[in-house]
Image (spheres, rainbow, N blue to C red):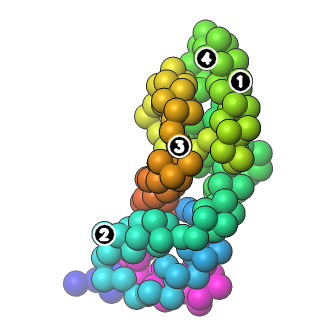
Amino acid sequence: MPDTLTALDAFNARPPDAAEAELLTCCASRAFARKVAALRPYGSVALLVAAAEAAVRELAWPDVLEALSAHPRIGERAAGTGREAAWSRQEQSGMAEPGAEDVRAALAAGNRAYEDRFGHVYLICATGLSGAQMLARLRERLRNDEEAERAAVRGELAAITRLRLGRLMEEAG
C-alpha cells in the first residue's frame, strides 16, 4: 500500500495557526477556527464536518457576527482573489442569470430592509439557488422574530461551512 498523505492527514498535521487560517476560509470566526483546530486530529472528514457544524451552532452571537462580516451581500460580487472570495462568487452564481435585473434590484432592496431589521448581512447558503429563490427566502425570513432569525443564520452558516470544508479537503487532496 503506498504511503500517501490525505488532505485530512495534512490538515491534522498542520501547526495550530496554519490549521486555523485554513478554517477561517470556511467560517470567518476566530472562535470557530480555534475550537475546530484544537479538536484535531480527526479520524475522518465526516468527523471534521460534524465538529465544525457543532462549533458553528455553539458560537456566541458576537462570533457569528464576526463570521458574517466576511460575507458579501447576496447579489454583490465578493472582492479579492483569495479562496474565500472565489468560493463566494461560485456560491452566488445563481445571481448571474440573464435577465435577472429585476431580481437583483429586489434583492438589493431586500438586503437593505433585512439589515435595517436585523443589523447584519442576510446570509443564505446560495449554492444551487437561483436569484428568485434567494429573494423568496429573504422575504420569508424578514417575517422572523430575532430568535428565529438567529437560528436561521446559524443554520445557513453551518451549511456554508460544511460546503467550504468539503472544498478545502478536495483542493488539498
Q: Earlier in the sequence, mark 4 or mark 1?
A: 4
Region rendered in magenta: 5-22
Asked if marks 1 and 3 touch (Cβ < 8 Å), the reply is no
Taking 76 as reference, is 130 above or below it? above
Residue under numbered circle 2? 46
Residue under numbered circle 1? 109
Asked which secondary structure carries label 4, the reply is helix
Taking 124 as reference, is 136 above or below it? above
- The residue carrying pointer 2 sits among few (fewer than 14), some (14 to 19) or many (20 or more) residues within 10 Å by Cα, namely few
Alpha carbon of mark 3 to alpha carbon of mark 2: how far? Answer: 33 Å
Which residue does the image show at 52% across and 82% down from the upper left? 35
Amino acid, disc 3: Asp
Asked if marks 2 and 1 touch (Cβ < 8 Å), the reply is no
Q: Earlier in the sequence, mark 2 or mark 4?
A: 2
Asked which secondary structure carries label 3, the reply is loop
Asked which secondary structure carries label 2, the reply is helix
Q: Give percent across and percent down for residue 43.
A: 31, 83
Alpha carbon of mark 4 to alpha carbon of mark 3: how far? Answer: 25 Å
